[in-house]
Image (tube, grey):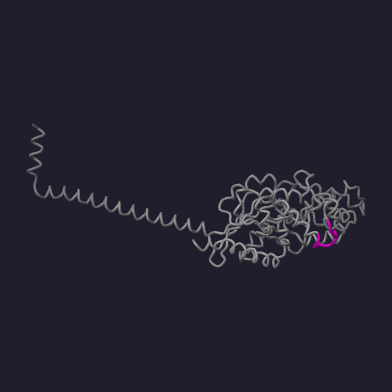
Amino acid sequence: MSSVMRSLGRCFLPAEAVGERGSGKGKSMDRDMLLGREARRRSREIDAMLERERRATKRLVKILLLGAGESGKSTFLKQMRIINGHEFDRRALLDFRDTIYDNILKGMRVLVDARDKLGIAWQWEGNEKQGMLVMSYEGWSGPPVDQATFLLYVDALRSLWADAGIREAYTRRSQFQLNYLPSRQDLLLARKATKGIVEHDFLYRRIPFKMVDVGGQRSQRQKWFQCFENVTSILFMVSSSEFDQVLLEDRRTNRLSESMDIFETIDNSKIFCNVSIILFLNKTDLLAEKLRAGTDIRRNFPEFRGDPRRLEDVQGFLVRSFRGRRRGERRSRPLFHHFTTAIDTENVRFVFRAVRDTILQENLKDIMLQ
């Protein structure tokens, strides 16, 4: 009965009340329609954004820098920044300054230690104390040294570098590890092992490029797989002057042989069957200097044929050696290669212009379709 009365009561409500209730329902429906329209608009925007990103990703020229440690990948990436107008700011330069101080002290530590192990006498006995001072430097595995700390070692460094015993040890540096050669191009020569992944983006003819540098030391190579997706081209860097040196990691493996082994794995991988791989035989300046000094490549590579003091003969042998590591269909394809000096900005500018055009030509269809 009560339910019937409630129904009758609703039937006899004033017209204003009925209008208000109807109006509330209408507003609710309008609000739902507006929300639905807004949701569809946002969905279309997201779809359009994802489509733009998909096209941009397909149009992106991704260049991967690979190679063993100390082959010059990071120096090459620094050059890319300079060439593309992305100069280092004051803070970055100050960071490099501390790294350079650290390089100098660590390099002198290596020389002092090598002089002792090679049985080379001091020219001046007083330098034994200076050598002990440098050996006391505790930054071997710590952060880069600051300017105030470096100044404490300046007199010792000058005295040691003037000593004939240290100079003789330096001439025999292929027998130990020395990572830094001071010159006016300190920023490019500063040695700091790459840990992790470093990227540099730039535009050329409205086409986006992404250059990726990954650490080359054995402990860093497991990170390479993180960068293998959507690779357009690989620049494989080799330190051509290190044919008579061994790895820092194990002190036994020849550095050039290690580079050839890595190249063989990368070049013949099914992952990169459609990726152009360009060989950069780097550190041409150091190779030429080493050959002029009489270092004979046949001691480490007895299969070498030609004049061991002639740069062109040695470079030809290196190219043939890397080409010989190719298998299957790769053997029938040309191996694009360049001789580079990564610390020479003009050389890198010239070489990369040719490389860039080669990459664009080989991938022109894919890039223009996007």
Image position of 84 (left or right of 346): left
Point out residue 21 in the picture as x, y percentages from the top left corner: 16, 47
**How many numbered markers are drawn?**
0
Image position of 86 (left or right of 260): left
Residue at the image point whose x is 61% and y is 48% from the top: 270
Give the main secondary structure of the magenta stretch: loop
Point out residue 319 in the picture as x, y percentages from the top left corner: 74, 57
Is 139 in front, or is 230?
230
Residue at the image point whose x is 30% and y is 54% from the top: 37
Is 15 in front, or is 83?
83
**Placement of 298 over or under 1, stated as above or below:** below
Residue at the image point whose x is 70% and y is 53% from the top: 192
On-image quarter of the N terminus = top left
Q: Is residue 308 magenta?
A: yes
Image position of 194 (left or right of 178): left
Image position of 125 (left or right of 1): right
Point out residue 142 in the picture as x, y percentages from the top left corner: 71, 47
Q: Is residue 20 magenta?
A: no
Point out residue 10 in the picture as x, y percentages from the top left corner: 10, 42
| Magenta-tinted stretch | 305-313
Residue at the image point whose x is 64% and y is 54% from the top: 213
Quadrant position of residue 207? bottom right
